[in-house]
């Protein structure tokens, strides 16, 4: 398949021919670009919010986790250049470190959305899946039970040397009681159609129109409609490092959302994250 025929969006049942995609092995280098791949799980509730991920850039491993106790505002987090601290596989999230032990079952709670897009001179792939989470967190000398909804983001591909994106993921309830989850982005997989932008209503996926993010990450605007989301940050993960060959700068606040999605879906409650990330890799 020619890259000019991308993007393709489906539930995973329709895929471009001739491109290596997960779960198949992907070359470490393709079109002179190193493979980047990660799997991220976010769980967003009214008592606790957490995220964890394993990342590989050109084969170099990296992992992180973070837990926000919303009642106290305490944010615990850890990052390591190790593939062993975090595992997300077979419907389970596991974190094993000196600072925390996390064991959470992740159950599908909506239709998967898979997108393959051109990026620079090569291609990138992603799969987003709403989930329900159930398990325990052992951290800061206490045990906390988790029962909440969230999103799993699996991504792989040969991103351009300089890549930047804005992103929002969250869950909540509509004014009519429908269960909601969303994934909104600009910068990657953001074509006018066949994008990864998705709103799930009671598990059914519908594509959202193009979105814009203000510099202060105070919300999400949908310029083709009168709809927008407002975001109130509560705690933030952030980091900036420049290793010359590789560089990364990101901010990812946890918080709450209010507003209306295109199509007139009004949020009664919303929990999740915003993110701004730029990378040279």
Image (spheres, grey):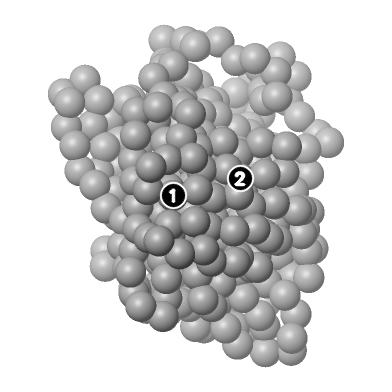
Other residues around mark 2 within 10 Å, as few (<14) / some (14–19) / many (≥20): many
User: Which SS class for mark 2?
Assistant: strand
Residue 260: horizontal and vertical position, in percent?
A: 57, 81
Residue at image position (59%, 66%) is: 145
| Relative to 251, residue 85 above or below | above
Q: Quadrant of the N terminus?
A: top right
Residue at image position (50%, 48%) is: 101
Q: Name the residue under label 2.
A: 93
Q: Real-space Cα distance between discs 2 and 1?
A: 13 Å
| Relative to 164, residue 29 above or below | above
Residue 92: horizontal and vertical position, in percent?
A: 67, 44
Residue extending furthest front?
141
Other residues around mark 1 within 10 Å, as few (<14) / some (14–19) / many (≥20): many
Mark 2 or mark 1: which is in front?
1
Q: Name the residue under label 1.
A: 100
- Is residue 170 toward the left or the right of residue 75 in the image? right
């Amino acid at each position: 398949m020619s890259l000019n025929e991308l993007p393709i969006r489906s539930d995973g049942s329709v895929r471009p021919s001739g491109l290596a995609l997960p779960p198949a092995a992907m070359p470490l280098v393709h079109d002179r670009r190193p493979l980047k791949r990660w799997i991220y799980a976010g769980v967003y509730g009214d008592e606790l919010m957490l995220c964890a991920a394993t990342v590989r850039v050109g084969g170099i491993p990296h992992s992180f986790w973070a837990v926000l106790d919303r009642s106290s505002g305490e944010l615990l987090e850890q990052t390591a250049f190790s593939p062993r601290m975090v595992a997300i596989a077979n419907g389970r999230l596991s974190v094993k470190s000196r600072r925390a032990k996390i064991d959470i079952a992740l159950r599908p709670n909506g239709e998967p959305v898979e997108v393959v897009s051109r990026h620079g001179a090569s291609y990138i792939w992603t799969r987003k899946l709403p989930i329900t989470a159930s398990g325990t967190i052992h951290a800061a000398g206490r045990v906390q039970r988790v029962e909440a909804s969230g999103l799993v983001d699996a991504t792989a591909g040969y991103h351009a040397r300089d890549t930047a994106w804005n992103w929002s993921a969250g869950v909540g309830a509509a004014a009519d009681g429908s269960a909601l989850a969303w994934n909104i982005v600009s910068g990657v997989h953001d074509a006018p159609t066949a994008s990864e932008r998705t709103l799930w209503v009671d598990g059914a996926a519908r594509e959202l129109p193009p979105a814009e993010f203000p510099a202060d990450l105070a919300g999400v605007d949908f310029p083709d409609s009168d709809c927008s989301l407002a975001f109130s940050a509560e705690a933030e993960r952030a980091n900036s490092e420049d290793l010359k060959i590789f560089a990364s700068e990101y901010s990812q606040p946890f918080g709450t959302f209010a507003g209306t999605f295109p199509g007139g879906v009004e949020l009664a409650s919303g929990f999740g994250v915003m993110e701004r990330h730029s990378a040279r890799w």
